[in-house]
Amino acid sequence: MASLNVGNLGNLGEYLREQRRTAQLSLRQLADAAGVSNPYLSQIERGLRKPSAEVLQQVAKALRISAETLYVRAGILEEKERDELETRAVILADPSINERQKQVLLQIYDSFRKENAAEAAVAAAAAAEAAAEAEAAAEAAAEAEAAHADADADTAAPDAPSPKSRP
């Protein structure tokens, strides 16, 4: 049977297969854990079927990875913050650490992201304020220069003789 691989479905299937193998699960084991049929999961992995968000959520839960990562790969969610989603997926899929450790790592990761976002917002506000001050200073300097040039023009031009009145 030929593979359709429409859009991101092939990418999704390859990713699911990779995650399943990393978790050391057979296709049948993952299908059972996710509550879907073995043939259906096989078709998803081969890019022949587009799973619903609900099925992706069940598969993600069975693989202990982020459902959002699967949504992005399936084209259900935008690719924004893809790095964050992939980082979360890697942490959640790591078989060498337990669930408590995974949750602690995710909490630390979230706190670092919030701290960096706050610092970036402060830096952006400071940069905007500095740019506004620089623009105001440049305008003031231009006005002062124009006023100085007008004053120089007034002193440099001799007074024109006044017309004499005729008797």
Image (cartoon, grey):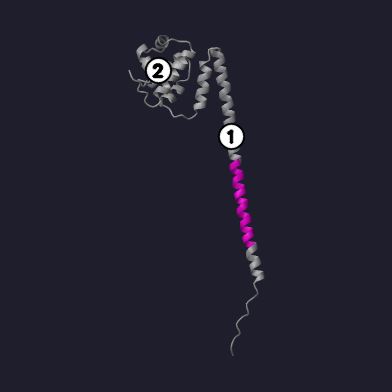
**Magenta segment includes 54:** no
**Magenta segment includes 134:** yes
Magenta segment's dominant SS is helix
Q: Which residue is mark 2?
A: 45
Nearer the observer, 7 or 155: 7
The three-letter code of the residue at mark 2 reads Glu
Which image quarter holds the N terminus? top left
Q: Is residue 32 left or right of residue 166?
A: left
Quick one: SS at disc 2? Answer: helix
Q: Which residue is drawn at the image coordinates 37% and 11% (left, top)?
A: 38
Residue 114 can be seen, yes or no: yes
Farthest front residue?
2
Q: Position of residue 134 (x, y in %)?
A: 62, 48
How busy is the neighbourhood of tag 2: few (under 14 within 10 Å), some, or many (20 plus)?
many
Q: Position of residue 64 (x, y in %)?
A: 48, 15
How busy is the neighbourhood of tag 1: few (under 14 within 10 Å), some, or many (20 plus)?
few
Nearer the observer, 129 or 109: 109
- CA gap, disc 2 and disc 1: 40 Å
Q: Position of residue 148 (x, y in %)?
A: 65, 62
Which image quarter holds the C terminus? bottom right
Q: Which residue is drawn at the image coordinates 58% and 42% (left, top)?
A: 128
The three-letter code of the residue at mark 1 reads Ala
Q: Position of residue 27 (x, y in %)?
A: 41, 11
The boundaries of the magenta stretch are 127-147
Residue 37 can be seen, yes or no: no
Q: Which residue is drawn at the image coordinates 58% and 22% (left, top)?
A: 108
Q: Which residue is mark 1?
A: 120
Q: Is residue 4 left or right of residue 136?
A: left
Farthest left residue?
1
